[in-house]
Amino acid sequence: MPRNRPPRRLALGLLAVLLACTRQPTDPVAALLADLEAAAEARDADRFAGWLSTGFQGAQRIDRGEALAQLKRYFAAYESVALDVYGVEVERGKGAARVRCVVEFSGRARKLVGLEGLLPPSAVHRFELDVVDEGGTWRVREASWQAAETGG
């Protein structure tokens, strides 16, 4: 009598996919960047802000609360968001790192009167982040950014 079980190759393939999906980058800075990117692409401002230090300082001296409010407004205005992060440079210190990278943004604005013409469908910014280990969790303490040219 034949057994009703999946072929061994299929089971091994599913196991490999599961392991690949659950594997996080071992470098905490790379993991932080990946989590920030995933939160932005999910348009989840609260999740994104969870990676900001409580003493976060951003461009024009915005604090964590204002950064969260801006992210919520921005993400609410878009139906979709996609990021391409490249040119990552990391200078490491003890329990801290300075990260420089380029982020290309593309998104589709919600179809609300007036938003389509006001919101950019794409943008490129050069970021500089100071990240710190806060009790085993790496978070962004400071961030600055400026418009940049495309150049993947």
Image (cartoon, helix red, strand yellow):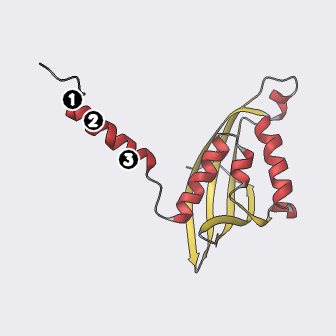
Residue at left 20%, top 34%?
A: 8
CA separation, marks 2 and 3? 12 Å
- The spot of residue 6 in percent (x, y) is 25, 28
Label 3 secondary element: helix
What amino acid does circle 1 point to? Pro
Question: In which quadrant of the rendered image does the N terminus lie?
Answer: top left
Please rate how many residues cluster around mark 1, counting C-alpha atoms within 10 Å: few if below 14, some from 14 to 19, many from 20: few
Q: Are marks 1 and 2 in contact (CB under 8 Å)?
A: yes
**Residue marked by disc 1:** 7
Residue at left 73%, top 54%?
A: 49
Residue at left 56%, top 64%?
A: 29
- The spot of residue 131 in percent (x, y) is 65, 68
- The spot of residue 31 in percent (x, y) is 54, 58
Q: Are marks 2 and 3 in contact (CB under 8 Å)?
A: no
Label 1 secondary element: loop
What amino acid does circle 2 point to? Ala
Please rate how many residues cluster around mark 2, counting C-alpha atoms within 10 Å: few if below 14, some from 14 to 19, many from 20: few
**Residue marked by disc 3:** 19
**Residue marked by disc 2:** 11
- The spot of residue 116 in percent (x, y) is 80, 27
Residue 90's disc is none
Q: Is residue 110 above or below residue 68?
A: above
What amino acid does circle 3 point to? Leu
CA separation, marks 1 and 2? 7 Å
